[in-house]
């Protein structure tokens, strides 16, 4: 039961992007298309679950005042694994995500979960926490990418939607990302405050 | 001639490819520390300093340690460790040399380790081929310095707007992060105008 709760909280109640407000850089930068968003989610979730497992295993061995550098080294190791794997098997994805693959290292979501959850809980709980957080991250990215890809590129999963229509390129650039996420947060707040009133 | 190129890099990192508003790097401190003008200025100064230093050291490590030994795949790990220890070092030096500056910047320094703009500038220095280029070290440092200036500019603009937003009447659900994002979007839209500049 508690495993399910740890998994579930990442999706809405403690959604890393919408509620906790962490991990924003990759969120905004890679959501220009749904396929980019999905690959980013896969890569980040792999790193998150991996680092959660290692951190929860070594949490009793490491001295507490050097824990942050150790966490960062663990995370950087997993990121290097992802980087090399993607470069070898999915070179197209590797190039379109660009520097945002190595930048997973400084995604505060991953360090945050290592510090806040994995360094205090067991391996199994940490795995489910990582999976839930990864899913919440992924869903937010998916919604954001959906709006930006349809409005900004007139495409869905890479297929043209309305032939001959000129899409609004501001949506694919930085302003569209900021404004769409702002509106999503607004919607999220509105839903949550309506829930509270009931 | 070289001066012209360096100046071009500087203008391009501050305005055309502003790290926050057009490349979307360093958003966590951009949103976290932009509530007050004076703390935004402190954070900005600390970032300018760390970014220039990080560009300098990551360049040296990449060119003289990683490249000759074919260890390029260790880039991510080594860069993040350099930045983390650099931040720690800067913190200790400032605390010793100038306690008043430390008072002003102190709380922001540890935050910089997880500022993806610092790591981003180190990676972009490698990516834009400065490592093999002529005067690469100088170009890297200029790019780091310019990126820091651009970050500070965006942070100050945002802080100025947010101080006024405090007094504005906005719907309850839009308060806080949502309105900040929409404002950032409008700022980014304005910065798109710079993309027409040719250098």
Image: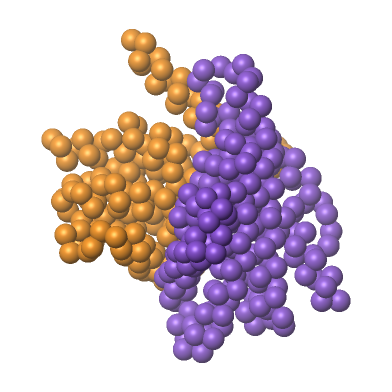
Chain colours: A orange, B purple
Residue under the point 60% across and 49% down: B42
Q: Judge from the rendering whether residue A116 lies leftward or rightward of residue B171; answer left or right.
A: left
The quarter of the picture where residue A44 lies is bottom left
**Camera-side residue: A130 or A159?**
A130
Note whether B198 is above or below A145 in the view shown.
Answer: below
**Please, which residue is most extreme toward the right here?**
B1
Q: Is residue A172 visible?
A: no
**Furthest residue toward left:** A1
In the displayed structure image, the side of residue A32 where residue B13 appears, left or right: right
Q: Position of residue B20 (x, y in %)?
A: 62, 49
Q: Nearer the viewer, residue A152 or B24?
A: B24
Task: Give residue B181's position: percent from left, percent from top.
Answer: 58, 35
> In this orientation, which residue lies closer to the viewer: B40 or B180?
B40
Could you tell me which residue is drawn at 22 percent across and 46 percent down? Answer: A128
Q: Is residue B49 left or right of residue A25?
A: right
Query: Can you say which quadrant of the picture contains the N terminus of chain B?
Result: bottom right
Residue B142's x, y, as percent? 70, 68
Residue at 74% of width from left, 52% of height from top? Answer: B15
Up the image or down, B126 lies above or below A44; here it is below
Q: Is residue B171 visible?
A: yes
Q: Residue at x 32, y 54 (%)?
A: A48
Looking at the figure, which quarter contains the C terminus of chain B? bottom right
Q: Where residue B37 sits: x, y (%)?
A: 63, 39
Residue B140 versus residue A171 in the image, above or below: below
């Amino acid at each position: 039961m508690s495993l399910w709760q740890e998994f579930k909280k990442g999706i809405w109640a403690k959604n890393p992007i919408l509620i906790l407000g962490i991990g924003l850089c990759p969120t905004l930068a890679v959501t220009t298309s749904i396929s980019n968003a999905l690959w980013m989610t896969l890569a980040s979730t792999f790193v998150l679950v991996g680092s959660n497992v290692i951190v929860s295993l070594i949490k009793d061995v490491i001295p507490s005042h050097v824990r942050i550098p150790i966490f960062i080294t663990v995370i950087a190791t997993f990121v290097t694994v992802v980087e090399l794997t993607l470069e070898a098997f999915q070179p197209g994805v590797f190039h379109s995500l660009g520097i945002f693959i190595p930048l997973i290292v400084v995604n505060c979501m991953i360090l945050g979960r290592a510090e806040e959850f994995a360094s205090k809980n067991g391996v199994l709980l940490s795995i489910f926490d990582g999976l839930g957080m990864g899913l919440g991250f992924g869903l937010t990215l998916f919604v954001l990418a959906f709006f930006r890809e349809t409005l900004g590129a007139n495409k869905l999963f890479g297929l043209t939607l309305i032939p001959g229509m000129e899409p609004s390129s501001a949506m694919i650039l930085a302003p569209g990302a900021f404004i769409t996420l702002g509106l999503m947060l607004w919607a999220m707040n509105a839903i949550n405050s309506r829930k509270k009133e009931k | 001639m070289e001066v012209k190129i360096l100046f071009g890099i500087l203008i391009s990192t501050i305005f055309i490819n502003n790290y926050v508003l057009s490349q979307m790097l360093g958003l966590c401190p951009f949103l976290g520390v932009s509530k007050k003008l004076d703390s935004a200025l402190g954070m900005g100064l600390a970032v300018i300093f760390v970014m220039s230093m990080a560009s300098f050291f990551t360049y040296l490590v990449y060119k003289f340690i990683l490249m000759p030994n074919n260890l390029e795949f260790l880039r991510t790990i080594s860069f993040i460790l350099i930045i983390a220890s650099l931040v720690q070092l800067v913190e200790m030096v400032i605390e010793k040399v100038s306690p008043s500056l430390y008072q002003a910047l102190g709380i922001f320094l540890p935050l910089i380790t997880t500022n993806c703009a610092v790591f981003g500038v180190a990676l972009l220095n490698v990516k834009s081929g400065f490592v093999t280029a002529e005067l690469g070290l100088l170009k890297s440092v200029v790019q780091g310095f310019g990126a820091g200036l651009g970050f500070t500019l965006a942070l100050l603009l945002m802080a100025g707007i947010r101080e006024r937003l405090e007094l504005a009447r906005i719907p309850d659900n839009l308060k806080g992060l949502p309105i900040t994002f929409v404002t950032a979007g409008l700022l980014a839209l304005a910065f798109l105008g710079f993309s027409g500049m040719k250098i």
